[in-house]
Image: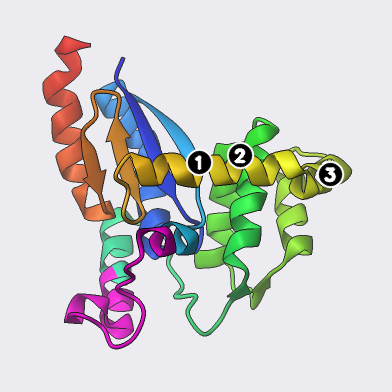
Amino acid sequence: MMMVDFYYSIGSRYSYLASTQIAALEKETSCRVAWHPVNSVRLINQRGVSPFKGEPVSGQYEWSYRELDAKRWAELYGVSYVEPRGRVRFDSELIARACTAAKRLGKVVEYSHLLFSAMFQDLLTEIDERECTVRAEACGIEPTEFRTALAAPETLSQLDTTIDRAYRSGVFGVPTFITSSGELFWGNDRIVLLRHYLCSHRRDT
Protein backbone atom coordinates (compact mmCIF):
# COMPACT_ATOMS: atom_id res chain seq x y z
CA MET A 1 0.00 0.00 0.00
CA MET A 2 1.36 3.41 -1.00
CA MET A 3 1.42 5.98 1.81
CA VAL A 4 0.75 9.65 1.05
CA ASP A 5 1.55 12.59 3.32
CA PHE A 6 -0.99 15.43 3.04
CA TYR A 7 0.26 18.84 4.20
CA TYR A 8 -2.55 21.36 4.52
CA SER A 9 -3.73 24.52 6.23
CA ILE A 10 -7.31 25.17 7.33
CA GLY A 11 -7.25 28.73 5.99
CA SER A 12 -6.27 27.55 2.50
CA ARG A 13 -9.15 27.34 0.03
CA TYR A 14 -7.29 24.80 -2.07
CA SER A 15 -6.48 22.67 0.97
CA TYR A 16 -10.21 22.58 1.72
CA LEU A 17 -11.05 21.56 -1.83
CA ALA A 18 -8.37 18.86 -1.81
CA SER A 19 -9.57 17.53 1.53
CA THR A 20 -12.99 16.75 0.04
CA GLN A 21 -11.36 14.33 -2.42
CA ILE A 22 -9.15 12.29 -0.11
CA ALA A 23 -11.65 9.60 0.86
CA ALA A 24 -12.34 8.88 -2.82
CA LEU A 25 -8.61 8.95 -3.60
CA GLU A 26 -7.92 6.33 -0.92
CA LYS A 27 -10.74 4.13 -2.18
CA GLU A 28 -9.80 4.41 -5.85
CA THR A 29 -6.04 3.92 -5.46
CA SER A 30 -5.80 1.79 -2.29
CA CYS A 31 -3.42 4.37 -0.82
CA ARG A 32 -3.46 5.61 2.75
CA VAL A 33 -3.27 9.34 3.41
CA ALA A 34 -1.66 10.77 6.56
CA TRP A 35 -2.93 14.25 7.47
CA HIS A 36 -0.34 16.83 8.57
CA PRO A 37 -1.72 20.27 9.56
CA VAL A 38 0.66 23.21 9.21
CA ASN A 39 0.53 26.96 9.53
CA SER A 40 1.14 27.84 5.89
CA VAL A 41 2.00 31.44 6.80
CA ARG A 42 4.96 30.19 8.84
CA LEU A 43 5.94 27.67 6.17
CA ILE A 44 6.02 30.31 3.43
CA ASN A 45 7.88 32.76 5.66
CA GLN A 46 10.47 30.07 6.38
CA ARG A 47 11.13 29.85 2.65
CA GLY A 48 11.65 33.61 2.58
CA VAL A 49 9.51 34.38 -0.47
CA SER A 50 5.74 34.89 -0.40
CA PRO A 51 3.58 35.37 -3.53
CA PHE A 52 0.90 36.91 -1.29
CA LYS A 53 2.92 39.92 -0.15
CA GLY A 54 2.84 43.12 -2.17
CA GLU A 55 1.27 43.30 -5.60
CA PRO A 56 0.23 39.92 -7.08
CA VAL A 57 3.06 38.47 -9.14
CA SER A 58 0.50 37.23 -11.69
CA GLY A 59 -3.25 37.14 -12.24
CA GLN A 60 -3.26 33.70 -10.64
CA TYR A 61 -2.72 35.37 -7.27
CA GLU A 62 -5.40 38.05 -7.64
CA TRP A 63 -7.90 37.41 -4.85
CA SER A 64 -10.89 37.87 -7.13
CA TYR A 65 -9.57 35.22 -9.51
CA ARG A 66 -8.72 32.82 -6.68
CA GLU A 67 -12.26 33.09 -5.33
CA LEU A 68 -13.74 32.43 -8.78
CA ASP A 69 -11.39 29.51 -9.33
CA ALA A 70 -12.26 27.96 -5.96
CA LYS A 71 -15.98 28.26 -6.67
CA ARG A 72 -15.51 26.51 -10.01
CA TRP A 73 -13.64 23.63 -8.34
CA ALA A 74 -16.31 23.38 -5.63
CA GLU A 75 -19.00 23.15 -8.31
CA LEU A 76 -17.05 20.42 -10.08
CA TYR A 77 -16.64 18.49 -6.82
CA GLY A 78 -20.24 19.06 -5.77
CA VAL A 79 -19.29 20.62 -2.42
CA SER A 80 -20.32 23.83 -0.68
CA TYR A 81 -18.04 26.84 -0.82
CA VAL A 82 -18.43 30.23 0.85
CA GLU A 83 -15.48 32.60 0.38
CA PRO A 84 -13.98 33.41 3.81
CA ARG A 85 -11.86 36.42 2.83
CA GLY A 86 -13.25 39.52 4.51
CA ARG A 87 -15.86 37.44 6.33
CA VAL A 88 -14.11 35.15 8.81
CA ARG A 89 -11.61 36.37 11.40
CA PHE A 90 -9.13 33.71 12.45
CA ASP A 91 -5.62 33.19 13.75
CA SER A 92 -3.68 30.85 11.44
CA GLU A 93 -1.46 29.72 14.32
CA LEU A 94 -4.43 28.91 16.55
CA ILE A 95 -6.19 26.75 13.99
CA ALA A 96 -2.95 24.95 13.11
CA ARG A 97 -2.38 24.20 16.81
CA ALA A 98 -6.01 23.13 17.17
CA CYS A 99 -5.65 20.56 14.38
CA THR A 100 -2.36 19.40 15.86
CA ALA A 101 -4.05 18.99 19.26
CA ALA A 102 -6.77 16.92 17.61
CA LYS A 103 -4.07 14.85 15.91
CA ARG A 104 -2.44 14.12 19.27
CA LEU A 105 -5.88 13.01 20.48
CA GLY A 106 -6.43 10.70 17.50
CA LYS A 107 -9.07 12.76 15.68
CA VAL A 108 -7.19 14.80 13.11
CA VAL A 109 -9.24 13.79 10.05
CA GLU A 110 -12.65 14.26 11.64
CA TYR A 111 -11.62 17.49 13.31
CA SER A 112 -10.00 18.97 10.21
CA HIS A 113 -13.17 18.34 8.20
CA LEU A 114 -15.16 20.18 10.86
CA LEU A 115 -12.80 23.16 10.89
CA PHE A 116 -12.81 23.26 7.09
CA SER A 117 -16.61 23.39 7.31
CA ALA A 118 -16.37 26.25 9.78
CA MET A 119 -14.12 28.15 7.39
CA PHE A 120 -15.68 27.42 3.98
CA GLN A 121 -19.24 26.23 4.51
CA ASP A 122 -20.80 27.69 7.64
CA LEU A 123 -21.65 31.37 7.76
CA LEU A 124 -19.38 32.21 10.67
CA THR A 125 -17.68 35.53 11.26
CA GLU A 126 -14.94 34.26 13.58
CA ILE A 127 -13.10 31.05 14.40
CA ASP A 128 -11.68 31.57 17.87
CA GLU A 129 -10.63 29.19 20.63
CA ARG A 130 -14.24 28.72 21.70
CA GLU A 131 -15.28 27.67 18.19
CA CYS A 132 -12.26 25.35 17.95
CA THR A 133 -13.40 23.71 21.19
CA VAL A 134 -17.00 23.41 19.98
CA ARG A 135 -15.80 21.61 16.86
CA ALA A 136 -13.61 19.32 18.96
CA GLU A 137 -16.59 18.32 21.08
CA ALA A 138 -18.59 17.69 17.89
CA CYS A 139 -16.13 14.99 16.86
CA GLY A 140 -16.06 13.31 20.26
CA ILE A 141 -13.23 15.09 22.09
CA GLU A 142 -13.99 16.11 25.65
CA PRO A 143 -13.66 19.95 25.85
CA THR A 144 -11.33 20.04 28.85
CA GLU A 145 -9.08 17.42 27.27
CA PHE A 146 -8.98 19.45 24.06
CA ARG A 147 -8.16 22.74 25.78
CA THR A 148 -5.39 21.02 27.73
CA ALA A 149 -3.91 19.58 24.54
CA LEU A 150 -4.27 22.93 22.76
CA ALA A 151 -2.23 24.72 25.42
CA ALA A 152 0.36 21.96 25.89
CA PRO A 153 3.97 22.78 24.87
CA GLU A 154 4.12 19.35 23.22
CA THR A 155 1.43 20.43 20.76
CA LEU A 156 3.37 23.49 19.67
CA SER A 157 6.53 21.39 19.45
CA GLN A 158 4.76 18.86 17.22
CA LEU A 159 3.48 21.65 14.96
CA ASP A 160 7.00 23.13 14.73
CA THR A 161 8.37 19.71 13.82
CA THR A 162 5.73 19.19 11.14
CA ILE A 163 6.42 22.57 9.54
CA ASP A 164 10.16 21.91 9.59
CA ARG A 165 9.69 18.44 8.08
CA ALA A 166 7.49 19.91 5.36
CA TYR A 167 10.10 22.56 4.59
CA ARG A 168 12.95 20.02 4.45
CA SER A 169 10.82 17.78 2.21
CA GLY A 170 10.49 20.55 -0.35
CA VAL A 171 6.96 21.69 0.47
CA PHE A 172 6.57 25.28 -0.74
CA GLY A 173 2.81 25.70 -0.33
CA VAL A 174 -0.40 23.94 0.53
CA PRO A 175 -1.96 21.61 -0.22
CA THR A 176 0.97 19.32 -0.92
CA PHE A 177 0.97 15.55 -1.25
CA ILE A 178 4.15 13.49 -0.96
CA THR A 179 4.08 9.78 -1.72
CA SER A 180 6.14 7.24 0.21
CA SER A 181 8.26 6.93 -2.94
CA GLY A 182 9.17 10.62 -2.63
CA GLU A 183 7.02 12.11 -5.40
CA LEU A 184 5.68 15.60 -4.57
CA PHE A 185 2.40 16.96 -5.94
CA TRP A 186 1.41 20.55 -5.10
CA GLY A 187 -2.08 21.92 -5.44
CA ASN A 188 -5.66 20.75 -5.54
CA ASP A 189 -5.49 20.67 -9.33
CA ARG A 190 -2.65 18.12 -9.20
CA ILE A 191 -4.83 15.47 -7.56
CA VAL A 192 -5.59 14.10 -11.02
CA LEU A 193 -1.85 13.57 -11.54
CA LEU A 194 -1.47 12.08 -8.06
CA ARG A 195 -4.32 9.68 -8.74
CA HIS A 196 -2.71 8.63 -12.03
CA TYR A 197 0.65 8.11 -10.32
CA LEU A 198 -0.83 6.01 -7.51
CA CYS A 199 -2.83 3.84 -9.90
CA SER A 200 0.20 3.37 -12.16
CA HIS A 201 2.43 2.30 -9.27
CA ARG A 202 -0.09 0.33 -7.26
CA ARG A 203 1.25 -2.97 -8.54
CA ASP A 204 4.77 -2.01 -7.37
CA THR A 205 3.84 -1.61 -3.70
Which residue position holds label 2?
158
Inspect this view and state whether residue 139 appears.
no
Which residue position holds label 1?
162
Residue 197 — which label? none
Circle 2: element type: helix
Residues at marks 3 and 2, CA–CA distance in whole angstroms = 15 Å
Q: Quadrant of residue 126?
A: bottom right
The x and y percentages for residue 124 are: 63, 73
Q: In this view, does 204 lie above or below 7?
A: above
Residues at marks 1 and 3, CA–CA distance in whole angstroms = 20 Å
- Name the residue at 29% across, 75% down: 66
Q: Nearer the viewer, mark 1 or mark 3?
A: 1
- Rendered-image quadrant of the N terminus: top left
Which residue position holds label 3?
148
Q: Which of marks 3 and 2 is in front?
A: 2
Q: Indicate the amino acid at tag 3.
A: Thr
Q: In which quarter of the image is residue 79?
A: bottom left
Which of pointers 3 and 2 lies earlier in the amino acid sequence? 3
Q: In this view, does 184 lie above or below 72?
A: above
